[in-house]
Image (spheres, rainbow, N blue to C red):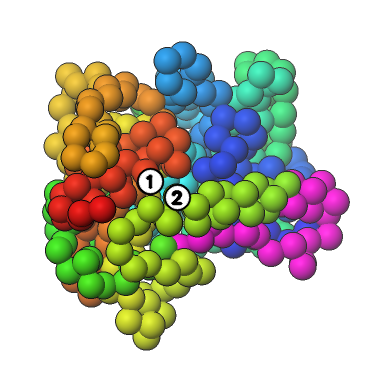
Amino acid sequence: MRATISTFFLCLAILLRGQTPIYDFVSFNKSISVPAKLNSERSAVIFSVPDKKGDFIEVGNHENFISQCHNAFVTMGIDAIFYLDELNLTASNSARLSYVELFNKRNIKNIIFLSQSESGYEILIAPFDGSTRILKDGGDVFYMQNKELYSLLLDVGKEIRRADQELYNFLIPEKPNYLGGLSIVENTLLKNYPGILRRSKLAVERFIKLDTSKISDSEVLANVKAYNREIDIKNQELESIMSSYPYEYILIDAMNDDELKRNRYQFLLRSAKSSAGIVKQMLDYDVLPSETGFVSVIPVMPDQTKAKTISREAIVYKFYIRQNISKNVHVGEWDADVTWQEALKNMIGNLTQELNVKN
């Protein structure tokens, strides 16, 4: 398979979590050629497992799956120093930047994607390109799949032995090292909303569509077009929900800090999506190991609220406002919810009540 990788491919997991691995939207050259120096360089593992369905959609169990993989990697001489759930990697653009910065700081040279689904298991190994794209455009990757995990790992081990690389990885961790939620708060976390929002325009980023102009692979193109149709629907919903925001706002395409400054956008609406516990970690909340769930404050307009308890492992969305000059983060109440639509409505309602807007 060959075509052009999209800069934004990691965003796709936000929409399609638990249904397809993120690299299904990336074009690459499949092979069983082991990356050079795999046995002498550090690797990071990004994994995907099916979600659990119950009262809430929760992060799936991965411990046994990852434990088996890590034990096999130790035997193969693969120094996998980090294990990261793709949901955490794609929680937000800020989260992805934080993880990539850590990978570069710890001298990660290879990325290993592990995917478990109802149809079986997949592994993909490729050089880390050092950016948020993760993989190089149109690059070669080591790829295998099998219905049985044991058989897959056995086949991978055979190819690595056949490659006969010189082994330098002698201090491989005995157990997998899981990465939790890295902070996405650049300065100070503030559990309120600034009164200046009454007279300041809030910038709201549209959901990003992917460029199809340089994609030649028909399967990847079909996946991206289907994703873009979903994005059109989401942006229509976003515009509809934002109409209830009580102050001035503007829908914008994604901008960097310099562009935000040039356009004089002082405040920017952002969100994060992951398990409730991880989102709290990312936003610098204190999270106790004993906490099994968190209470979201749900606004009941015009001036009441109700409590909604959501389990720690439930996949939630939390909206917050970033002050672009000071880089402070205003989160208001903890009002995360299980859909982005409800989470956004919660934030707008709680902000309206906090700032005493009179209808």
Q: Which residue is mark 2?
A: 241
Which of the 4 image quarters holds residue 6? bottom right
On whether residue 221 falls in the magenta region, the answer is yes
Q: Position of residue 67 (x, y in %)?
A: 45, 21
Residue contact between numbered discs 1 and 2, judged by CB atoms under 8 Å: yes
- Which one is in front, 184 or 114? 184
For residue 164, say whether it is visible: no
Q: Residue at point 69% right, 64% down?
A: 211
Identify the secondary structure beneath mark 2. Answer: helix
- On screen, residue 47 versus residue 260, left or right, reads right
Residues packed near mark 2 inside 10 Å, few (<14), some (14 to 19) or many (20 plus): some
Which of the 4 image quarters holds residue 178? top left
Q: Position of residue 278 (x, y in %)?
A: 31, 36
- Which one is in front, 63 or 356? 356
- On screen, residue 268 versus residue 90, left or right, reads left
Which of the 4 image quarters holds residue 107? bottom left
Question: Identity of the amino acid at label 2?
Answer: Ile
Q: Is residue 77 above or below residue 133?
A: above
- Which one is in front, 57 or 243? 243
For the residues marked 1 and 2, what is the alpha-carbon distance in whole angstroms?
8 Å
Question: Identity of the amino acid at label 1?
Answer: Leu
Q: Residue at point 33% right, 76% down?
A: 265
The disc, 1 or 2, on the residue closer to the chain's N-terminal end is 2
Question: Any mark on residue 264, and which?
Answer: none
Q: Position of residue 304 (x, y in %)?
A: 19, 34
- Residue extent of the magenta highlight: 205-225
Identify the secondary structure beneath mark 1. Answer: helix
Q: Is residue 81 above or below residue 104?
A: above
Question: Any mark on residue 344, and which?
Answer: 1
For residue 212, say whether it is visible: yes
